[in-house]
Image (cartoon, grey):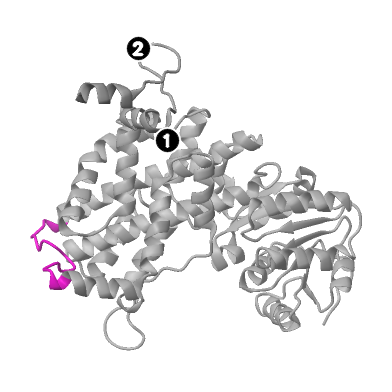
């Protein structure tokens, strides 16, 4: 294996597909890179790919010591290994050969508190540490991902020149990378990005379900609809790949592949973390939470098969009403419902990031996060430019829903949104994402809610006290005593 004639600029450890692709991307941008993996066959495979893909300046190492020694000082090493214990193991292996001032970057989907713990532990050894969210999947890693580095600003400065070139490039707003903030903020922002992604995917699945089950659209028609949507306000990576999916024929027989895929969604955990964080911070995130619940319910495939039999026997078919609908009108209504629901999902994600930023003192810039999500990442969409502009207009915007432009768009679309949700309910099709988004909007826009009754109940049985609308202060009423007297 050819050794570099002089020290390389950077190192990367962990050569599963994401690691390989990011290493090749870095090399292709003109930065000589050393690579290492515990299973050495992966090293050879990456070196082979570098030769094939343009004789790129990538150098493989089979042992950690020579790998670390091959990198110029102060050394920077990116790790792309499985979150949790494997990260600690890799740090232990590499840090044994590293020197003061060197830097480790974790590019995995790590829990933000683990990053903060490691940053402190590394600082005691004189090493710098960054937790960097990487989004864009395998393709993004190879040709330009969205990068969310957080932790040591000094460490970020070491590799800013590399990240600016490696990240996705968006013509009017630059490279999709920024220094997110201190501590585990980079990992936290990537986690919420994934939560928003869960919401987006669920909303798209619901749009598909309504169009297919009620509108009776064929896969060919669905492909045309989504391709058309991808030319307007919904233009995004997820809409684009959805259109692609509808066009792919079954490789093992007749029909289309999408109809042969088992209706059981997997997950890695970032969506669950997002919902847990929302609960911890008392931030309502119903669209994201409903997408997580939908994945849980999809996992109960065997139970659902049995339930369908029980209810079919009782006269319940898959679709309750076989009504004739105006396809063109339905397609337009679903488009508007999808867009309005999407605004709610992103509002929830942004509010969660803001709440955490306030709690931790991270001073995160929401407009800048929207900018770096415009390219490279899974949730990249033309719509993010609108979000960036909303926060540019007002960095303290309480909620995207009340930005004048978004408010206007929701008002224009709310009739269609309600029609779709009603149609789905009457047809017996669940649209948890669209329904909970609509409930979120309707709750947020109302000056007075029935929460007064809930608070009265709390005071009745638990003496939790309540505030009043007509007088300042905290009050307790002996409801039980008064009610008993009234009954006598």
Q: Position of residue 15 (x, y in %)?
A: 69, 73
Marks 2 & 1, CB-CB < 8 Å contact: no
Disc 1 residue crowd, few under 14, some 14–19, many 20+, Cα 10 Å? many
Pick whichever, 398 or 458, lies toward us.
458
Relative to 233, is 32 above or below?
below
Q: Position of residue 112 (x, y in %)?
A: 65, 51
Disc 2 residue crowd, few under 14, some 14–19, many 20+, Cα 10 Å? few
- Mark 2 and mark 1 lie on one chain; the one further toward the N terminus is 1
In the picture, the quarter occupied by the N terminus is bottom right
Using the rendered image of the protein, determine whether residue 447 is visible from the camera's viewpoint.
no
Question: Residue shown at 84%/71% (left/top)?
Answer: 67
Using the rendered image of the protein, determine whether residue 153 is visible from the camera's viewpoint.
yes
Displayed quadrant of residue 6: bottom right
Instruction: Kindly report the secondary structure that dominates the magenta region of the rendered protein.
Output: loop
Would you say residue 67 sits in the magenta stretch? no
Left or right: 71, with 417 as reference point:
right
Question: Residue shown at 22%/61% (left/top)?
Answer: 211
Left or right: 308, with 299 as reference point:
left
Which one is in front in this view, the residue at disc 2 or the one at disc 1? 2
Displayed quadrant of residue 409: top left
Q: Position of residue 195 (x, y in %)?
A: 49, 53
Q: Which mark is residue 281?
A: none
* Residue under pointer 1: 400
Q: Position of residue 374 (x, y in %)?
A: 51, 49
Displayed quadrant of residue 95: bottom right
Question: Residue shown at 29%/36% (left/top)?
Answer: 442
Q: Which segment did they paint magenta?
A: 312-327
* Residue under pointer 2: 470
* Element carrying mark 1: helix
In the picture, the quarter occupied by the C terminus is top left
């Amino acid at each position: 294996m050819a050794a570099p004639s002089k020290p390389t600029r950077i190192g990367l450890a962990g050569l599963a597909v994401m690691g390989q692709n990011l290493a090749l991307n870095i090399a292709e941008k003109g930065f000589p890179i050393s690579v290492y993996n515990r299973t050495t066959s992966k090293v050879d495979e990456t070196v082979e790919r570098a030769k094939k893909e343009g004789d790129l300046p990538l150098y493989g190492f089979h042992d950690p010591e020579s790998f670390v020694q091959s990198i110029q000082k102060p050394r920077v090493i990116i790790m792309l290994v499985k979150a949790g214990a494997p990260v600690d193991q890799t740090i232990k292996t590499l840090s044994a050969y590293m020197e003061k001032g060197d830097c480790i970057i974790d590019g995995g989907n790590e829990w933000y508190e683990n990053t903060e713990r490691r940053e402190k532990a590394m600082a005691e050894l004189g090493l710098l540490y960054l937790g960097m969210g990487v989004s864009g999947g395998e393709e993004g890693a190879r040709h330009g991902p969205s990068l969310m580095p957080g932790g040591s600003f000094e460490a970020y400065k070491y590799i800013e020149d590399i990240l600016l070139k490696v990240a996705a490039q968006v013509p009017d707003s630059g490279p999709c990378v920024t220094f997110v903030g201190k501590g585990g903020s980079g990992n936290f922002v990537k986690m919420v990005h994934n939560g928003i992604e869960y919401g987006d995917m669920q909303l798209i699945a619901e749009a598909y379900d309504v169009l297919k089950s009620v509108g009776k659209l064929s896969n060919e028609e669905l492909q045309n609809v989504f391709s058309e949507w991808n030319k307007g306000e919904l233009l995004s990576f997820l809409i684009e790949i959805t259109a692609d999916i509808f066009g792919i024929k079954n490789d093992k027989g007749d029909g289309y592949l999408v109809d042969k895929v088992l209706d059981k969604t997997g997950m890695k955990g970032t969506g669950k973390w997002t919902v847990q964080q929302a609960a911890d911070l008392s931030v309502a995130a119903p669209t994201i939470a409903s997408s997580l619940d939908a994945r849980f319910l999809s996992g109960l495939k065997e139970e659902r098969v049995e339930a369908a039999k029980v209810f079919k026997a009782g006269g319940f078919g898959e679709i309750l009403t076989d009504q004739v609908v105006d396809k063109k009108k339905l397609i337009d209504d679903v488009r508007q419902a999808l867009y309005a629901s999407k605004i709610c999902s992103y509002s929830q994600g942004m509010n969660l990031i803001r709440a955490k930023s306030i709690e931790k003192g991270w001073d995160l810039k929401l407009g800048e996060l929207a900018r770096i999500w415009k390219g490279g990442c899974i949730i990249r969409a033309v719509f993010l430019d609108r979000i960036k502009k909303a926060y540019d207009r007002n960095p303290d915007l309480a909620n995207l829903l009340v930005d004048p432009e978004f408010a206007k768009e929701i008002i224009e679309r709310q009739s269609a949104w309600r029609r779709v949700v009603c149609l789905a309910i009457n047809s017996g099709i669940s649209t948890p994402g669209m329904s909970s988004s609509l409930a979120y909007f309707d709750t947020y826009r109302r000056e007075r809610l029935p929460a007064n009754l809930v608070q009265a109940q709390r005071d009745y049985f638990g003496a939790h006290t309540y505030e009043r609308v007509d007088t300042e202060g905290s009050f307790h009423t002996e409801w039980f005593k008064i009610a008993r007297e009234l009954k006598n």
